[in-house]
Image (spheres, grey):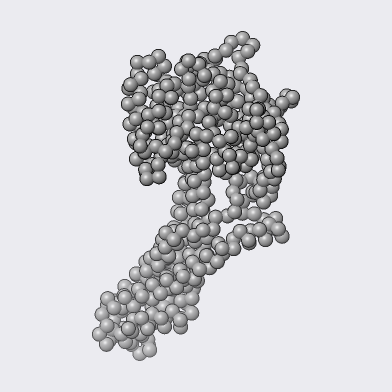
Amino acid sequence: MYKVILAIRYLLKRRISYLAFLAVALCVFIVVVVMTVMTGVVGDFKEKNHNFAGDCVVGTESLVGFPYYEDFVKKLEQADFVYAVSPVIKSYALVSPGQTSRNVGLELIGIDPARHIRATGFGDTLYYHQNDPAKAFCPEYDPNSIGFIIGIDRWIARNAEGRYDYESVARNEELIVSCVPLNAKGALSKAGTDVVNTKSFYFSDTSHSGLAKVDYWTIYLPFEQAQMLCGMDGQDKRINAIHIKFKPDEKVNVGCEKVSALWQNFVRENSGRDKANLLQNVTVQSWKSYRRTFIAAMEKEQVMMIAVFMMVGIITVFIVLVVFYMIIGHKSKDIGILKSIGVSNGNIIQLFSGFAFLIGISGSAVGAFCGWLFLLKINSIEEWLFRHFGFQLWDRTIYAIGEIPHRIEPEVLGLIVLAAIAACLAGAIIPSWQAARLKPVDSLRVNQL
């Protein structure tokens, strides 16, 4: 009991203890806020990439694509672990507004919307066809026209608050799309002056995936039209990728391994066909591997942020270390009295370790609570700062971020609190050991009393 009473007394009576308490509270507050925001941003970015790609992608980076996909799609659809499959055309196109000489190069993605919305989260990105995404390429003003869907950032500029001012009705606008068709050998399909395939499409909808590059550089066309423009509609039709979604009870890594085994068998079965060499360039990847170029950069920033706050934790250890040295220096009389009545070295260490634990748990509790309150109001605070001073944490006209992430993950919070307590205990180890080694005859000398 005396160990608890003395530890509480040291915490409440010694003003120097407040320094350690405030250091722990401030450190926990900063780490909780920054790690919650950073974890939320990274988690949201991964989720958007997952929705964009589906669970697994069978594809090639070559613009030539690969043939015989229809046979493999049938195998996938018959597999008991596959929920949906979507063949996709991926290429590049020169896009020009009708009746103008302006043009811009965009990434072209050809999809069957009815299949693609089942394999990915594409249906949730649409605006005018939210209720009927299967008809996404049917313009509301003219259902008989062939429509196009374009990335939201290419079509509408974000305002300062990160919102888009959609028109109530989709406007009638024509785009002329031109592609250079390639044959199965990678050469031009056409020669002479008519080397490019060109076709007019009409605005149908926008796609807001939340991925800045995708939403600014992508145009979506109906699958058959894209296949024709890219020269992949010959006798042996070709595609660039197959997006796959697994059933809910199937783990992504396990599902990808099964798809990879199916693909290897498929390649062996078709090794004698004319264009079988194109199948050798196809890879099977999980959504995370498929989008690794973008995800890796975010994860690296997160790791660097964690490393920075580990250094902050080390600073906290040294603050606690100094505080304990000062307290033990002023409490040598107490230690001498305790040892003179038979208190063991281990109990002395436990006393000051308990004191360190009290500082850690109380400081962590206050820091975590203040962090939670701040995160609860963080978007309101940013809105007030923007309204009065024009300050934003992220410029919404540049970054594809809505509200600042503020949901605290219990696992992250628990890890931060445990790390803070561990830092306090680590800072108290050396002073506690030195206190235990004090001899009563030295600490109770007349000049020490």
Position of the N terminus by quadrant: bottom left
Residue drawn at x 42%, y 38% is 83
Pick the front one: 27 or 212: 212
Pick the front one: 361 or 402: 402
Residue drawn at x 69%, y 47% is 159
- Asked if 131 appears above or below 368 in the picture, the reply is above
Rendered image quadrant of residue 310? bottom left
Is 385 positioned to the left or the right of 183 in the image?
A: right
Pick the front one: 392 or 438: 392
Could one spot residue 428 in this view of the protein?
A: yes
Across and down, in percent, residue 67 comes to: 44, 21
Is 144 positioned to the left or the right of 290 in the image?
A: right
Residue drawn at x 47%, y 46% is 299
Across and down, in percent, residue 190 comes to: 57, 12
Could one spot residue 217 in this view of the protein?
A: no
Across and down, in percent, residue 87 comes to: 48, 29
Across and down, in percent, residue 272 comes to: 35, 15
Rendered image quadrant of residue 351? bottom left
Pick the front one: 219 or 311: 219
